């Protein structure tokens, strides 16, 4: 998603321009089943809890 089209459309943008990093995708994990999002976990900035492999596997 180099141009942030998906991130913008889903509201998962993280604006770090104040820190000189520009606009980016917030850290998230998504489970999609047959084209339907069944789980979306969005991290707080700087965190790595709900999007870890272990956390996602626990939701499967």
Image: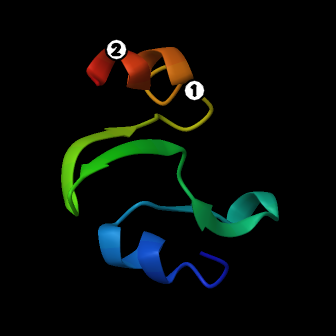
Q: Secondary structure at mark 2?
A: helix
Front tag of 1 and 2: 2
Quadrant for the C terminus, please: top left
Sequence-first disc among 1 and 2? 1
Looking at the image, how many numbered discs can be counted on the residues? 2
The colour scheme is rainbow
Tell me residue 30's x, y (percent): 37, 46
Q: Nearer the viewer, residue 47 or 18?
A: 47
Q: Dividing the picture into quarters, in which one does residue 20 lie?
A: bottom right
Residue at image point 67% right, 79% down: 2
Against 14, residue 10 (above or below) is below
Residue at image point 54% right, 24% down: 52
Quadrant for the N terminus, please: bottom right
Q: CB of mark 1 within 8 Å of CB of mark 2?
A: no
User: How far apart in space, not on screen, are marks 1 and 2 (Cα)?
Assistant: 18 Å
Query: Crowding at label 2, few (<14), some or many (≥20) Cα neighbours within 10 Å?
Result: few
Q: In the image, is 11 to the left or to the right of 43?
A: left
Query: Crowding at label 1, few (<14), some or many (≥20) Cα neighbours within 10 Å?
Result: few
What mark, if any, has residue 59 been given in the picture?
none
Tell me residue 4's x, y (percent): 55, 78
Tell me residue 50's x, y (percent): 43, 24
Tell me residue 58's x, y (percent): 34, 14
Q: Nearer the viewer, residue 49 or 36?
A: 36
**Residue sitting at the far right:** 20
Residue that mark 1 sits on: 47
Q: Dividing the picture into quarters, in which one does residue 34 lie?
A: bottom left
Q: Nearer the viewer, residue 27 or 56?
A: 56
Against 3, residue 28 (above or below) is above
Q: In the image, is 53 to the left or to the right of 35?
A: right
Q: Secondary structure at mark 1?
A: loop
Residue that mark 2 sits on: 58
Residue at image point 55% right, 38% down: 45
């Amino acid at each position: 998603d180099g141009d942030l089209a998906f991130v913008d459309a889903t509201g998962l943008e993280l604006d770090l321009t104040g820190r000189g990093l520009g606009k980016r995708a917030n850290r998230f994990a998504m489970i999609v089943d047959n084209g339907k999002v069944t789980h979306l976990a969005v991290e707080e900035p700087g965190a790595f809890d709900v999007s870890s492999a272990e956390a996602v596997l626990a939701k499967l």
